[in-house]
Image (cartoon, grey):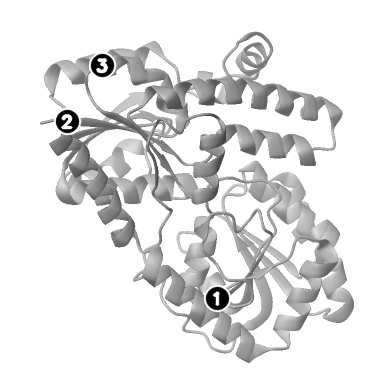
Amino acid sequence: MNILFLAPRLPLPADTGGKIRTLNILKQLSVENNVYLLCFSFEKTDHLHAEMLRRLGIDVHMVPIAEPSLIQKIKAIVFDSLPFSILKYHTPQMIQSIQHVLKKHAFDAVHVDHLHMAVYNGYFQGIPCFLDEHNVEYKILERCALVERSWVKKILYHNQSQKMKTFESRKVKEFNGIFACSVDDQLLLNDLGHEQRPIHVIPNGVDTGYFNTRQNMKNEDAVVFTGSMDWLPNDDAITYFCKEILGLVWQKNNTLKLYVVGKNPSKSVKTLSRRDVRVIVTGRLEDVRPFIDRAKIFIVPLRIGGGTRLKILEAMAMGCAVISTSIGAEGIDYQVGINIAIADKPAEFAQKIIDLCKQPHVVQTMGQEGRHLVCQKYDWAIVGKKLNDIYQETFYACL
């Protein structure tokens, strides 16, 4: 098949969960199809990263775009009916590029990556279009409003969540099919009234060869968190963990370290490390595996989120024991106490850490069970086969 893949950003470097999913979906589609990637370019170095995709046989065309100014953001948030994060990606330059590409190439299907690019679906009349919902976007904004303490920000989040819900509800009706990351997201989309559209669960995955079994069997007395720290849910998770949970752990185990691994940590997160040497904030790293390998436990204290957390799949693939909130572990087919520990209250979360640090055999068994789960259900090759089968079925149904 000839597939047009429409994305908001070049997925390299793959330093966010969204980029990791986009990159691996692209790789899997290119195994059996001719893929043409049309995306925005925010960075001057994007042309260098695009060469890696071209070496995989993916045709790449990028449309330059700049981050909006503060004034543009305020005007859009206050006066526009579209949510700002959608409006940001709606440009005349992309419309022109789409029209140009459609004149030059004949496509059997269009894969729209992220709801943010759904504004362009009207230009693909007569071509089957699928929308990959990395998250149910309005739900993330709703959760941001729930945990936000500033009443001004709370109002803004509520405003944007309502705009997003209206946009999301309207747009997903217009596609031939929807890809959701989890059954939880599938149910949320059904609740919006879209049972008439096929909603396929295409879960996030992990490269189980790259994220392989831990090599360091003598782990540090440490817990680790990984993720893009410029994404609000991750920033909130670590701030919450340090304020509400870590002190409780230190009352029983004052040597425990916390590693925070991810790009662009906020000023407040950096301040946490300056206040206490037991909190280590690394910033962006090319390879997070050594830090997962050295820690006893992988923590996911998320209070905001959607989709499924790639970070959990990566930790499980490495055989690392995971403690998560229920929101953090949403969408993963886990078994509590077998391949993951779940804790939603600060005291409960702290006690899970304290207990597991004293039970190396439980940590090892939980890690082994986590590895078994991802190898059976979440390897990218398994995910890719399901995705390619859906496209093949669509292709033959159109003949």
Q: Position of residue 72 (x, y in %)?
A: 60, 14
**Residue pushed farthest front?**
196
- How far, Cα to Cα, is label 3 from label 2? 12 Å
382 to 230, vertically: above or below: below
- How far, Cα to Cα, is label 3 from label 1? 47 Å
Q: Position of residue 90 (x, y in %)?
A: 44, 17
Q: Which residue does the image show at 16% across and 43% down from the upper left?
A: 33
Instruction: Give the label on residue 108, or none.
Output: 2
| Helix, strand or loop for disc 2 | loop
Tell me, yes or no, whether the two marked residues, 3 and 2, touch with CB atoms within 8 Å: no
- Between residue 174 and residue 78, name the one nearer to us: 174
| Helix, strand or loop for disc 1 | loop
**Residue pushed farthest left?**
399
Label 2 crowd bin: few (<14), some (14–19), many (20+), radius 10 Å: some
- Between residue 50 and residue 140, name the one nearer to us: 140
Tell me, yes or no, whether the two marked residues, 1 and 2, touch with CB atoms within 8 Å: no
- Between residue 3 and residue 13, name the one nearer to us: 3
178 to 270, vertically: above or below: above
On the question of residue 360 being in view, the answer is: yes
Residue occupied by mark 3: 125
Q: Position of residue 389 (x, y in %)?
A: 23, 49
Residue occupied by mark 1: 320
Residue flagged by tag 2: what amino acid is it? Asp
